[in-house]
Image (tube, coloured by chain):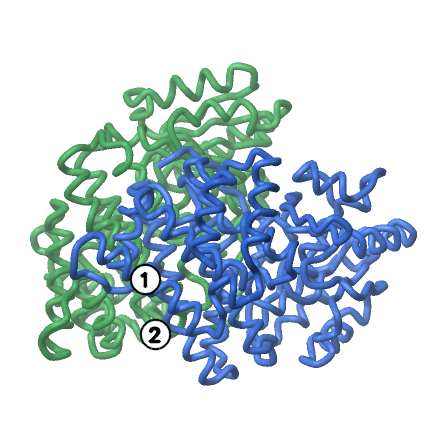
Chain colours: A blue, B green
Amino acid sequence: MNNFTFHNPTRLVFGKGQITQLSTLIPSEANIMVTYGGGSVKKNGVYDQVVAALSNHKYIEFWGIEPNPTVETLRKAIAKGKENKIDFLLAVGGGSVLDGTKLIASGILYEGDAWDLVLKGGYGEAIPFASVMTLPATGSEMNSGAVISRAETKEKYGFFNTFPSFSILDPESTFTLSPYQIACGVADIFIHVVEQYMTTPRQSRIMDRWAEGILLTLIEIAPKIKANQHDYDVMADYMLSATMALNGFIGMGISQDWATHMIGHELTALHGITHGHTLSIVYPGTLRTLKEQKSEKILQYAGRVWGITEGSDDERINRAIESTEKFFRSLGLLTRLTENGVGEETIDKIVERFNKAGAAYGEKGNVTGDVAKQILQSSL
Amino acid sequence: MNNFTFHNPTRLVFGKGQITQLSTLIPSEANIMVTYGGGSVKKNGVYDQVVAALSNHKYIEFWGIEPNPTVETLRKAIAKGKENKIDFLLAVGGGSVLDGTKLIASGILYEGDAWDLVLKGGYGEAIPFASVMTLPATGSEMNSGAVISRAETKEKYGFFNTFPSFSILDPESTFTLSPYQIACGVADIFIHVVEQYMTTPRQSRIMDRWAEGILLTLIEIAPKIKANQHDYDVMADYMLSATMALNGFIGMGISQDWATHMIGHELTALHGITHGHTLSIVYPGTLRTLKEQKSEKILQYAGRVWGITEGSDDERINRAIESTEKFFRSLGLLTRLTENGVGEETIDKIVERFNKAGAAYGEKGNVTGDVAKQILQSSL
């Protein structure tokens, strides 16, 4: 096990009817800006609950943080925040609203342009922020990371600042998500887990088991969600799995990968494909391309997650990779580039970007432009 | 899944050589009291590392917090802390030193007698404290609980205040633990997990898998620890399992038991048996007595943890209980009361105490004096 420091101060408030707790969780003297996406919270009842809970607080609203939040939109929110001397942000919506809000929280304290902060990769200062999270996927509700896009240049990068002071998760708010949102959410969670798990073998027995525990949960609940999206306990498992997949709980003392995410971000930046969907396209290719390097871990995954115990090493590895891709397809996602209208010319663009950035991703730092090319070609 | 709030602000600093980080983790202006047990830290090198790391800090020492820390000893530490205007405590040692330090941290801010705080069950105020934990067992390093004894009356109760601001865990400090300390530590961790796991079925798939993940880890590493106590990765897994078993990570949204702990505390209070050892005596009896109530969860445990998949429900349940007791015996622990010099008269005393307190423990609140009697009689 590698040395590590773990520290996650976010208060997680989970369950039915918990949005009412906003009234006490936010300091009464706070000068709040509530940030929203496109309006789905008005359909699922969350907006009304937030308004009711904040009846004794002073707040303004900022609407319109889009999926894959752009710095172009966030600059407007930062200006509004500065102008109104906002000292507390509450993000209400999915991971994009929260990710955008993380940049706003730093941008309000920063003199220069917000895109500089993204290019720095992080900024230690931020005004306090919290969330009511309605779309289980990104794990943003209990980590310090965000992913921000720049529409103008079709770029998309990670950004880190501080943790939400609290996040409220009510599984009932997931009852009205679209099947496609859920499919992309489940894929996103699954890949968050394997980015931390499918790396160097024998680093930590507990981290391995916990990662496998989330994967087994996702595989078990995916058909149940399809069958009945109003089954509270199933939706609670789904929601909790998103948070636990990317809050550091399964990442202690282990090496991590994240190459699939880096490639996926390019597919979103260039083609607008939803984040979780890009991962389901890229990941089987990552495994096919790096199956020798990852063989020991894939074999463990084959046995413990998919129950594949018979056949040669090669056969079990191939079956595990096939099972992974089939799982994504069972969610309703198209797992090949060509099925999503992406061809060779996009591969060339991504390789060019990777080479220009000197990319060296993955747990061994060997996913360069050339390797990304192999991964994408095997995903055509 | 039940509604829950999770919040664990402790910073976990884990790995080789991490004790040096004390120099920056404790504020430079702090007026520190370092608390110790009986001196094992002078043998394993931890004391020298702490002294070196604190060379630029101002501190005094308090020695002699005993296993099952007594209020009688802690009153002296509180007096010394008040007298020296201590504003930061650093516990160096095992769970007893840290548990005692939690009471000191509150006692320093309290006018009355420290035993009042224990009888209250908790106290919201405490001066900041942290730990260098050397004995993986209690999980105290990342939770707000402590167990305090009163020698005079042979009483032992739980007490809750606040979380350590940080805990440093270096697996190398476990290399010199005695086999008995390790056996009791592993049993303690195991029972912390099952107190949260072996309760109401189908509450949370992830919490179930994570609990099982720790149990599987313990079962896998126990013989490896015996074979080579200097295997860093094995000892790191052992140390991390202790922290993860009782920091709230496996307890979200689920009902909990803790009856075995309450009975075990009485065995320690009355006979001085080491905490982890008492649990290994009581727990198989708890399962034998409550096997109908817990049947669905025991069957899950039989299959997933022990690989017991054949036979009738009854047969699998019985085999799982036998496997559990055999595991404790494989650690070198004697799992029967009579083997530990405890007879019927102690059972009567415990039942009397339970009845007097109106005890109603367990996930269903049905472990009364009568049920405790059945549990203990089946453990004779």
Q: Could you tell me which secondary element the residue under label 1 belongs to?
A: helix
In the image, what residue occupies the spot 57% across and 33% down? A358
Name the quarter where the N terminus of chain B is drawn. bottom left
| Res. B198 image quadrant | bottom left
* Image position, residue B254 (x, y; %): 42, 68
Judged left or right of residue B216, residue A46 is: right
Look at mark 1 in the image and give the residue it sits on.
B195
- Left or right, A283 with reference to B230: right
* Figure label count: 2
Q: Chain of mark 1?
A: B
Residue type at the position of mark 1 = Glu
> Left or right: where does residue B345 sit relative to residue B17?
left
Q: Say if labels 1 and 2 share a chain.
A: yes
For label 1, the crowd category at 10 Å Cα-Cα, with few meaning under 14, some 14 to 19 and many 20 or more, is many
Q: CA distance from mark 1 to mark 2?
A: 11 Å
Of residues A331 and B183, the one drawn nearer to the viewer in this rendering: A331
- Indicate whether A72 appears above or below B3: above
**Is residue B182 found left or right of A349 in the rendered image?**
left
Q: Is residue B373 visible?
A: yes
Residue toward you, B300 or A259: A259
Residue depicted at x 40% and y 61%? A214
Residue at the disc numbered 2: B200
